Amino acid sequence: MSIHSRVMRSGLSQALPFLLPLLLLGACQPPKVDLDDDEAAAESLIRDGVVAVSPRRPDAGAIEHTLRFPEPHTHYVEVESIFPTDGEDEVTLFMAVWTPGSYLVREFAGHVEHLRAATLAGEPLGATKSQKNRWTVSTGGEDQVVVRYRVYANLMSVQSSFVDDDLVVLNGAGIFLCPVGRLGLEHDVSIELGETHPAIATSLPPHPDGGRRFVASSYDVLVDSPIVAGEGEVRNFDVGGASFELWTFGGGAFWDHDRAAEDVRTLVEVEAGFWGTIPFERYLFLNVAGTNGGGLEHLESTLMMTGRFSTRRDEDYRKWLGLVSHEFFHAWNAKRLRPVELGPFDYENENHTPSLWIVEGLTSYYDDLLLMRAGLLTEAQYLERVQRNIGGLMNRPGRTVQSLSAASFDSWVKYYRRDENSRNSTISYYNKGSVVGFVLDAYVREVTGGQSSLDDVMRLVYERHSGARGYTPEDFRAAVREVVGESAPAGDGGDEGEGGHGAEGEASGVDALLDAWVDGTSELSFEEALDYYGLAFEGEADAEAERPDGRADGDGDDDDDTAGWLGVKQTGGFVTEVRRDGPAYGAGFSHDDELLAIDGFRVRDLAVHLARYRPGDTVSVTLARRGRLREISVTLGRAPGEDVYSLTDSDPLTAQQRSHRAAWLEDVTDVPAPAPATDQDVVEASAQNPAPAPAAAPSVVAPPPVPAAPGDDPGQEGQSGEQNPGAQEEG
């Protein structure tokens, strides 16, 4: 029987917190319920809207926070925090400028108002803003100081916070202050909300005194544990000895809670089996159903946003499942397996790494693949997603300008700060990383005779570099070489062999491929990967006819009804983007040009107008630039379409190719039981006060978590929480 627990409206409704077992010592196993258990067992977990979780009392000297929402319709949260002074004359407090998993400085301190300080008795103390995100508080010789301020929270996104009279979404990075250099202090968080927000869900364990009060073992954990409150429903299930909760806020009767829980459970089983370990005892899927989209991973939860009607349309529902798959995969590949640069975090500055393509790109490769292996996508649906990823990359001019490692490193200043030239000069490390995952997986399978795959590479890197250790780009390469049986290149501790570098120092094998695919900008070759799986591009035979410059054979033929292509995007008649590989770019078109007429006729709808012309036609375009009219002559081209990369079966499709494809799409591993936490599992990653990493063990069954670890704004090209700039017309 499918179990479910509906959270009823109740003034005593509290959080769905859960134990952070790998961070807290001496914690006991929370109760578990399997989807096959009876409903009575499920209901026993719920008491006044709260899933029973072992409480935790904070240490003496913990920072105490109280959040109040006296007028939630104004979008403000009032924060009162009590900080220990340790006998110092001054205490300097900071607010993070970014949130883990979203690589953009968001300047959360800009939403802070009316910061004041006082003694516990209410006597005013001096509080001065010393930097954009720092405040210095005079202690007056007190053991503790009280700091009060307000935060404006009206951005509905997975990276920010939102407050109104129906829903509260809190991301700790933009809410809580912390003393500089004291990231290891515990936090005691009390939330005062009324009947309008009957349920609260968070991964923070509850305080033993009850109420809506929770405990975070460190600042890293505090900002890695979002809190959602409102009208919510929860479905509970058990996989491999670990407990899971799927919370949905705002879905109401429009959301199919039971179907979603069944499918998420199936996906959890497949992903846990992929990694061979479940490194936590409890995990929350925090799903906010409304009008926004996106997701962000956290240590033992994920915050996701989707349309409230997503379960009513199959394509929307599959897209949501892809989001779930992506974010849950990050529980391993991001939160516990991370590049060395992403932990311990510096919360006040950018944290650059060339390896986001592994964190996000390879996660994007596996999110749909594991949906396929879970039986939640058909083969046709999955291959359509593969071809869409390939087409998206090959139709982006920036692929010849920016490498994958450079895109990863510059995410802070380019990927999240797009402009009219971004398509020409950049790539998405989500998109190209996923495509590189596809060709790299096929390469590993082919050179090992089907005995190994990229799956084995990921598990090997996880075994050796998860937890406190982290990995470098060379560590990842070394794992690929080991799996395919290559020796290390000269100078890297190994002899010359099949792979590595040749006699003259030129890279070969794995290194040559990754030099080109990751650190270079040369075109990817798909022929070998497609042939291995018995696939081919439907448009291969017409490749020459698809040249975007319009000079291919057949252009202008009487029987060709293909519309001419200018290579611009426009909104309201104004050019918003000029593609580097399009005719308009070479002809001298510019961003913000106003398109007025073509061959003397007024342009109302660019696509309709260009449909009258054919590739190879030369036209005269009248435009206005900074208020001055000008004429530009341009020869129209042929639009590069993604249909060129539509996949079909090879002809002929051999039995061996069918076998290769089946092994790729149907590879499923048994679900493991979670390993218990140990003293060595406790890792407090702190930017200002990092703890030394433990010595690497030769084999790790359940690697320790790193609270401050990287992550995702999920969704490849469409970043969660970013606003849609408006529809654009392309021609």
Image (cartoon, rainbow, N blue to C red):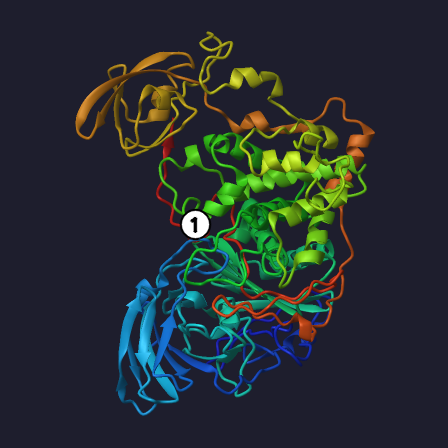
Hey, which residue is sitting farthest left in the picture? 627
Q: Is residue 69 left or right of residue 546?
A: left
Seen from the viewer's position, the closer of residues 606 and 642 is 642
Hey, which residue is sitting farthest bottom in the picture? 121
Asked if 150 appears above or below 608 in the picture, the reply is below
Seen from the viewer's position, the closer of residues 487 and 397 is 487
Asked if 656 appears above or below 404 in the picture, the reply is above
Classify mark 1: residues with Cα within 10 Å, few (<14), some (14-19) or many (20+).
Answer: some
Q: Quadrant of the N terminus?
A: bottom right
Seen from the viewer's position, the closer of residues 300 and 401 is 401
Give the residue drawn at x 59%, y 41%.
434
Residue 713 in percent (x, y) is at 50, 53
User: SS class of the residue under badge 1?
Assistant: helix
User: Is there any visible trace of residue 159 in the rendered image?
Assistant: yes
Residue 19 in percent (x, y) is at 61, 75
Hey, which residue is sitting farthest top in the picture? 558
Q: Quadrant of the C terminus?
A: top left
Quarter location, residue 651? top right
Q: Which residue is mark 1?
A: 412
Q: Amino acid at mark 1?
A: Trp
User: Is there any visible trace of residue 13 in the rendered image?
Assistant: no
Give the residue drawn at x 44%, y 63%.
347
- Count of numbered tags: 1
Residue 25 in percent (x, y) is at 65, 79
Residue 38 in percent (x, y) is at 72, 72
